[in-house]
Image (tube, helix red, strand yellow):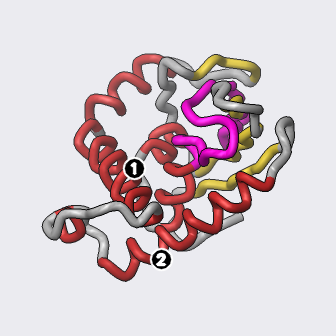
Amino acid sequence: MEGVRITFERMADRRPVETLVERDDGVVFSMRGAGGGAALPHDLVHALVERSLLVPDGIWGCIADGVVWRSMRHVSGRQPPHAAERSERLKRERAARIQAAEGVADLVGRLARKEPVLAGEVPASGKSAEALAVAAEELVAAGRRWADLEPGMTWAVEWDHRPGRRR
Protein backbone atom coordinates (compact mmCIF):
# COMPACT_ATOMS: atom_id res chain seq x y z
CA MET A 1 0.00 0.00 0.00
CA GLU A 2 1.18 3.49 -0.64
CA GLY A 3 -1.44 6.05 0.23
CA VAL A 4 -4.86 7.01 1.43
CA ARG A 5 -7.55 9.44 0.43
CA ILE A 6 -9.02 11.03 3.52
CA THR A 7 -12.31 12.94 3.30
CA PHE A 8 -13.18 15.04 6.34
CA GLU A 9 -16.76 16.23 6.80
CA ARG A 10 -17.21 19.57 8.53
CA MET A 11 -19.72 19.18 11.33
CA ALA A 12 -21.64 21.89 13.14
CA ASP A 13 -20.54 23.00 16.59
CA ARG A 14 -18.15 20.61 18.37
CA ARG A 15 -19.66 17.33 17.14
CA PRO A 16 -17.04 14.68 16.26
CA VAL A 17 -15.71 14.96 12.73
CA GLU A 18 -16.82 12.25 10.33
CA THR A 19 -13.98 11.00 8.15
CA LEU A 20 -13.92 8.57 5.25
CA VAL A 21 -10.58 6.75 4.82
CA GLU A 22 -9.97 5.07 1.44
CA ARG A 23 -6.76 3.05 1.23
CA ASP A 24 -5.05 2.34 -2.09
CA ASP A 25 -5.91 -1.36 -1.71
CA GLY A 26 -9.62 -0.53 -1.99
CA VAL A 27 -10.47 -0.96 1.69
CA VAL A 28 -12.64 1.84 3.08
CA PHE A 29 -13.16 2.84 6.71
CA SER A 30 -15.13 5.51 8.48
CA MET A 31 -13.73 7.30 11.49
CA ARG A 32 -15.05 9.67 14.10
CA GLY A 33 -12.44 12.07 15.36
CA ALA A 34 -11.83 14.99 17.65
CA GLY A 35 -12.54 18.47 16.43
CA GLY A 36 -15.65 19.77 14.85
CA GLY A 37 -17.07 23.17 14.29
CA ALA A 38 -14.60 25.78 13.08
CA ALA A 39 -11.60 24.14 14.80
CA LEU A 40 -9.25 22.18 12.53
CA PRO A 41 -9.82 18.47 13.30
CA HIS A 42 -6.95 16.63 15.00
CA ASP A 43 -6.73 13.96 12.27
CA LEU A 44 -6.66 16.62 9.54
CA VAL A 45 -3.83 18.39 11.39
CA HIS A 46 -1.90 15.10 11.34
CA ALA A 47 -2.57 14.55 7.64
CA LEU A 48 -1.43 18.03 6.70
CA VAL A 49 1.64 18.10 8.97
CA GLU A 50 2.76 14.56 8.06
CA ARG A 51 2.36 15.35 4.35
CA SER A 52 4.10 18.72 4.62
CA LEU A 53 7.05 17.32 6.59
CA LEU A 54 7.19 14.07 4.58
CA VAL A 55 6.65 11.86 7.63
CA PRO A 56 6.31 8.36 6.08
CA ASP A 57 5.47 6.40 9.22
CA GLY A 58 3.23 8.61 11.33
CA ILE A 59 -0.49 8.13 11.85
CA TRP A 60 -1.43 8.21 8.16
CA GLY A 61 1.57 6.22 6.96
CA CYS A 62 0.56 3.50 9.40
CA ILE A 63 -3.01 3.56 8.09
CA ALA A 64 -1.74 3.38 4.50
CA ASP A 65 0.32 0.33 5.52
CA GLY A 66 -2.64 -1.44 7.11
CA VAL A 67 -2.95 -0.21 10.69
CA VAL A 68 -6.54 0.00 11.87
CA TRP A 69 -7.13 2.19 14.92
CA ARG A 70 -10.01 1.55 17.33
CA SER A 71 -11.77 4.67 16.02
CA MET A 72 -11.99 3.12 12.53
CA ARG A 73 -14.99 1.09 11.32
CA HIS A 74 -14.71 -1.09 8.20
CA VAL A 75 -17.13 0.08 5.49
CA SER A 76 -16.18 -1.83 2.34
CA GLY A 77 -13.46 -3.62 0.44
CA ARG A 78 -11.79 -6.91 1.15
CA GLN A 79 -9.11 -6.69 3.80
CA PRO A 80 -5.88 -8.61 3.13
CA PRO A 81 -5.31 -11.94 4.88
CA HIS A 82 -4.14 -11.54 8.50
CA ALA A 83 -5.00 -7.82 8.44
CA ALA A 84 -5.67 -7.63 12.19
CA GLU A 85 -2.38 -9.32 13.06
CA ARG A 86 -0.47 -7.05 10.67
CA SER A 87 -2.14 -3.99 12.18
CA GLU A 88 -1.16 -4.97 15.73
CA ARG A 89 2.40 -5.82 14.68
CA LEU A 90 2.84 -2.47 12.92
CA LYS A 91 1.49 -0.62 15.96
CA ARG A 92 4.09 -2.32 18.16
CA GLU A 93 6.97 -1.89 15.71
CA ARG A 94 6.22 1.77 15.03
CA ALA A 95 5.15 2.87 18.49
CA ALA A 96 8.08 5.28 18.92
CA ARG A 97 7.62 6.78 15.44
CA ILE A 98 3.88 7.16 15.97
CA GLN A 99 4.58 8.97 19.25
CA ALA A 100 7.12 11.18 17.46
CA ALA A 101 4.51 12.03 14.80
CA GLU A 102 2.09 13.01 17.57
CA GLY A 103 4.76 15.26 19.04
CA VAL A 104 5.60 16.91 15.72
CA ALA A 105 1.93 17.55 14.92
CA ASP A 106 1.48 19.07 18.38
CA LEU A 107 4.60 21.21 17.94
CA VAL A 108 3.50 22.51 14.53
CA GLY A 109 0.03 23.20 15.91
CA ARG A 110 1.51 25.27 18.74
CA LEU A 111 3.73 27.14 16.26
CA ALA A 112 0.66 27.85 14.11
CA ARG A 113 -1.22 29.19 17.15
CA LYS A 114 1.85 31.23 18.14
CA GLU A 115 2.03 29.44 21.50
CA PRO A 116 5.32 29.16 23.39
CA VAL A 117 7.70 26.43 22.23
CA LEU A 118 10.66 25.27 24.29
CA ALA A 119 14.06 25.76 22.69
CA GLY A 120 14.89 22.04 22.73
CA GLU A 121 11.65 20.96 21.05
CA VAL A 122 12.55 22.07 17.53
CA PRO A 123 15.82 20.11 17.22
CA ALA A 124 14.25 17.16 19.04
CA SER A 125 11.57 16.97 16.35
CA GLY A 126 14.19 15.95 13.78
CA LYS A 127 12.91 18.63 11.39
CA SER A 128 14.52 21.96 10.63
CA ALA A 129 13.08 25.13 12.13
CA GLU A 130 12.39 26.33 8.57
CA ALA A 131 10.43 23.19 7.65
CA LEU A 132 8.41 23.46 10.86
CA ALA A 133 7.68 27.14 10.16
CA VAL A 134 6.46 26.32 6.65
CA ALA A 135 4.23 23.53 8.02
CA ALA A 136 2.86 25.95 10.65
CA GLU A 137 2.06 28.54 7.95
CA GLU A 138 0.29 25.84 5.93
CA LEU A 139 -1.69 24.88 9.04
CA VAL A 140 -2.77 28.49 9.60
CA ALA A 141 -4.03 28.67 6.00
CA ALA A 142 -5.74 25.30 6.39
CA GLY A 143 -7.46 26.53 9.55
CA ARG A 144 -8.92 29.47 7.65
CA ARG A 145 -10.04 27.20 4.80
CA TRP A 146 -11.66 24.73 7.25
CA ALA A 147 -13.47 27.51 9.15
CA ASP A 148 -14.90 28.76 5.84
CA LEU A 149 -16.52 25.39 5.10
CA GLU A 150 -20.22 25.13 5.87
CA PRO A 151 -21.40 22.18 7.99
CA GLY A 152 -21.83 19.14 5.75
CA MET A 153 -19.10 20.22 3.31
CA THR A 154 -16.02 18.04 2.90
CA TRP A 155 -12.28 18.43 2.43
CA ALA A 156 -10.33 15.58 0.83
CA VAL A 157 -6.62 15.07 1.41
CA GLU A 158 -4.41 12.71 -0.58
CA TRP A 159 -1.65 11.26 1.57
CA ASP A 160 1.13 9.31 -0.11
CA HIS A 161 4.19 7.47 1.23
CA ARG A 162 6.49 8.49 -1.56
CA PRO A 163 8.35 11.65 -0.51
CA GLY A 164 7.38 14.71 -2.46
CA ARG A 165 4.52 13.01 -4.28
CA ARG A 166 1.10 14.55 -3.93
CA ARG A 167 -1.69 13.17 -6.03
Residue that mark 1 sits on:
57
Which numbered disc, 1 or 2, marks the residue closer to the eye?
Answer: 2
On the image, the x and y values in percent for residue 143 come to: 63, 58
Q: Residue 154's image quarter? A: top right
Query: Is there any visible trace of residue 146 in the rendered image?
Result: yes
The structure residue drawn at horizontal position 43% and vertical position 57%, both measured from the top left corner, is 109
Q: Residue at x 24, y 68 (%)?
A: 122
Give residue 123's position: percent from left, percent from top: 19, 70
Residue 118 lies in the magenta stretch: no
Q: CA distance from mark 1 to mark 2?
A: 20 Å
21 over 38 or under it: above or below: above
Residue range highlighted in magenta: 20-44
Say what amino acid the circle numbered 2 marks: Val
Quick check: 2 above or below 108?
above
* Numbered label tally: 2
First reached walking from the N terminus: tag 1 or tag 2? 1
Indicate the amino acid at tag 1: Asp
Left or right, 92 with respect to 86, comes to left
